[in-house]
Amino acid sequence: MKKHNFSAGPSVLPNEVLFEASKSIIELDNIGLSLIEISHRSKEFISIMEEATERVLEITKLKNKGYKAIFVQGGASMQFLMAAYNLLENKGAYINTGTWSSKAIKEAKLLGEVNEIASSADKNFNYIPKKYKIPVDAQYLHITTNNTIFGTQYKTFPKSPIPLIADMSSDIFSREIDFSKFDLFYAGAQKNIGPAGVTLVVIKEEILNRVSRNIPSMLDYSNYIQAGSMSNTPPVFAIYTTLLNLRWIEKNGGLKEIEKLNTAKAKLIYDEIDRNTCFEGFSDLNDRSIMNATFTLKNEKRKNEFDQIWMKNNINGLNGHRSVGGYRASIYNALKVESVEELIRCMKKFEKN
Ligand SMILES: *Cc1c(COP(=O)(O)O)cnc(C)c1O
C-alpha cells in the first residue's frame, strides 16, 4: 500500500501519472521503443514538447500574450543565476522571504547590485512583508511566491512598476492567479509538476535582450526559445511526466478546481493545528501557505511520541526543515484529502494520549 506522502520535494504525484510515465519507460505509445531510447528530435518527442509548452500557456492563460514556455535543466537554483544573467544590467530588487529568496539574492550579487527592499528575517521568515518601496531604476523585482520551508505564501502580489519575476517552485499550478502580472516565473518541477531534472520557465519575450553582457548559450533564455528548448538534449522523461501531469490538471477541471481542493485540504489541516491543544502553527495567519503547513509541538519533549504515531499510520515526510523544526505537512496538488484526514486522526490521537 502506498504511503500518505507529505514530503516537501520531490513529492507526491498522481498515481495515474506515475502509471503512464512508467509505461513509457518500457514502450511509448506502441511505437516499439522506450521514451528514453528515442531521439529528442523524433516526431514523437517533438510532439510531446510542443504539447507540454502549449498546455503550460493554456493553463496559465498566457497564450498569444507574448509569453514563451521553456524547459531548462539545473533546477530552480540555476534560475537564481540565469534570471539575473539575462535581466540584471546594474540593479535587481528582491524581497527576502526565506532560504530560497536568500539563495536567489546571493547569485544575483555576482552580476550587479542587489537591493533587498524587504525581508522577514527578523521573525525567522514567518510572514510575508507588506511594506516596501519598489525602486524604479532596478531592472526587475524578484519574489518567491511560496516559501516551502517556512510555510508562507503571497496572497496578493506586489504592484510592480518594473518587471516582476517569481520563483513559483512550490506553488505553481496550485491556484488560479493572474499569471500576466508576472514577466517571468520559474519552477523546479519536483514539487508540483513532475520529477526532478527539469525546470519550467515562462517568459514575456519583450523583457529579453536588454542587458549589455554576453550570455553563454546554455544560460541564454533567447537560445532556449529559439531552439524550442532543444539546443541540446532535454530531459525527456521529466518533460513527458510533466506533460502527463499537465493533462491531469486539465482533466481535473484546471486551476480553478485544483485550487478548491487545495484550499479545502489546507483548511482541514490548519483548523486542526489551531484546535489541537498540543500544536502551534508557525506562520502568520494571513500568510499561511496552502501548500506547506508548518507547525510545532507545544511540548518538544513529546516529539518521539507523536513521531511514533504518524509513522505507524503510514505517513511519510512530515518532519519540518531544520530552520523551523517541528513539522511540515506538504499538501501539493496530488496529495489526497484522505491523507490529510489520516494526519488529522494522528494529531487527535496524540492529543488524547
Ligand atoms: C525546492 C525549491 C527550490 C530549489 O529547487 P531545485 O530545483 O532543487 O534547485 C527553489 N525555490 C523554491 C521555492 C523551492 O521550493
Image (cartoon, rainbow, N blue to C red):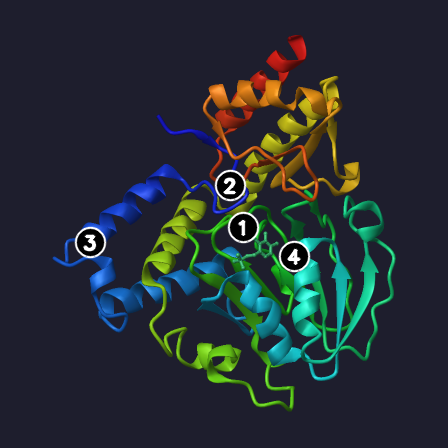
Amino acid carrying label 2: it is Asn
Q: Nearer the viewer, mark 1 or mark 4?
A: 4
In the drawing, does residue 74 fall left or right of residue 324? left
Q: Which residue is drawn at 55% across and 35% down?
A: 261
- Residue 29: give its label: 3
Amino acid carrying label 3: it is Asp
Please give the residue where the numbered disc 4 appears in the rendered image.
Answer: 100
Amino acid carrying label 4: it is Trp
**Disc 4 beta carbon < 8 A from ligand 1?**
yes
Mark 4 → mark 3, Cα distance in angstroms: 38 Å
Sequence order check: which comes first, mark 2 or mark 3? Answer: 3
**Disc 3 beta carbon < 8 A from ligand 1?**
no
Please give the residue where the numbered disc 1 appears in the rendered image.
Answer: 173
Determine whether label 2 and label 4 are within 8 Å by CB: no
Q: Residue at x 65, y 87 (%)?
A: 211
Query: SS of the residue at dot 4?
Result: helix
Determine whether label 2 and label 1 are within 8 Å by CB: yes
Badge 4: few (under 14), some or many (20 or more) residues near its Cα, within 10 Å?
many
Mark 2 → mark 4, Cα distance in angstroms: 21 Å
Residue situated in front as seen by the camera: 314 or 14: 314
Please give the residue where the numbered disc 2 appears in the rendered image.
Answer: 333
Residue situated in front as seen by the camera: 147 or 141: 147
Sequence order check: which comes first, mark 4 or mark 3? Answer: 3
